[in-house]
Amino acid sequence: MTPRSTTREVVWSTLSTTWGPFAVGDDGEALVGLQFPPGLEASGSVPRRPLAAALGRELREYLAGKRTAFRTPIRLEGSPFQMAVWHALGTVPYGEVITYAELARRLGRPQAARAVGQALGANPIPIVVPCHRVVGSDSSLGGYGPGLVWKRRLLELESRTVAQRKNAPPSQPHGATWI
């Protein structure tokens, strides 16, 4: 008997947004990757599956300040520490920021701020798993895979949206379904 592979084929789709193109990778059940400039290599039109189309709608709403949480199912693979860091990001509400050190404390590893930064740098689904909400202890932006310009834009978007919704119900942490 041949063992069944648990590896699923990832299909990448290119999404157009007002902020530029995004590449979305999904395995048919969950989102597994999100890339955007400068790391995105334009590859033309790729057939989209329903998950990519759903994330496209959510992403456009988010970038327009009309969405604060994602509902598209996601699948992340990483070390136990990376997984813990990425899950902890879900506790950081839209429009708020915390420090690398605070995130390390929340994980019960107060000396692991640099390791938290490395785990954030390996996040394959930025924005949906909101690593842009983590900054340095001195309020510096720290790092961000797609570039600090993108991190600054995302933080400004969320801050502006929160300011415009002062009378709205409290924000929710990202609501993607983990598979």
Image (tube, rainbow, N blue to C red):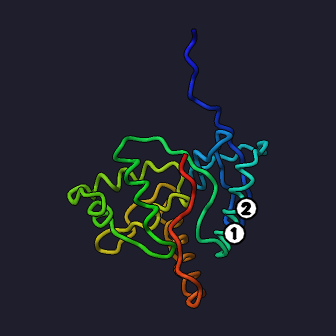
99 left or right of 122 in image: left
Q: Quadrant of the C terminus?
A: top right
> In this view, which residue lies farthest toward the front?
1
In this rendered view, identify the residue nearer to me: 34 or 106.
106
Q: Mark 2 falls on what kind of element?
A: helix
72 left or right of 116 in image: right
Q: Position of residue 75 (x, y in %)?
A: 55, 45
Q: Position of residue 70 (x, y in %)?
A: 61, 62
Residue under the image location 47 percent in, 64 percent down? 132
Q: What kind of residue is marked 1?
A: Glu
152 left or right of 64 in image: left
Residue under the image location 64 percent in, 36 percent down? 10
The 10 Å Cα crowd at callout 1, few under 14, some 14 to 19, many 20 or more, is some
Q: Position of residue 54 (x, y in %)?
A: 72, 56
Q: What kind of residue is marked 2?
A: Arg
User: How many numbered marks appear?
Assistant: 2
6 left or right of 108 in image: right
In this rendered view, identify the residue nearer to me: 51 or 111.
51
- In the picture of the structure, the residue carrying the numbered disc 1 is 61
Classify 95 as above or below 179.
below
Q: Quadrant of residue 55?
A: bottom right
Q: Mark 1 falls on what kind of element?
A: helix
Residue under the image location 41 percent in, 73 percent down? 97
Q: Position of residue 167 (x, y in %)?
A: 58, 90
Mark-to-mark CA distance, 2 and 1: 6 Å
Q: Which mark is residue 57?
A: 2
Classify 4 as above or below 75.
above
Would you say the residues marked 2 and 1 are in contact, meaning their CB atoms lie under 8 Å apart?
yes
Q: Quadrant of residue 120?
A: bottom left
The 10 Å Cα crowd at callout 2, few under 14, some 14 to 19, many 20 or more, is some
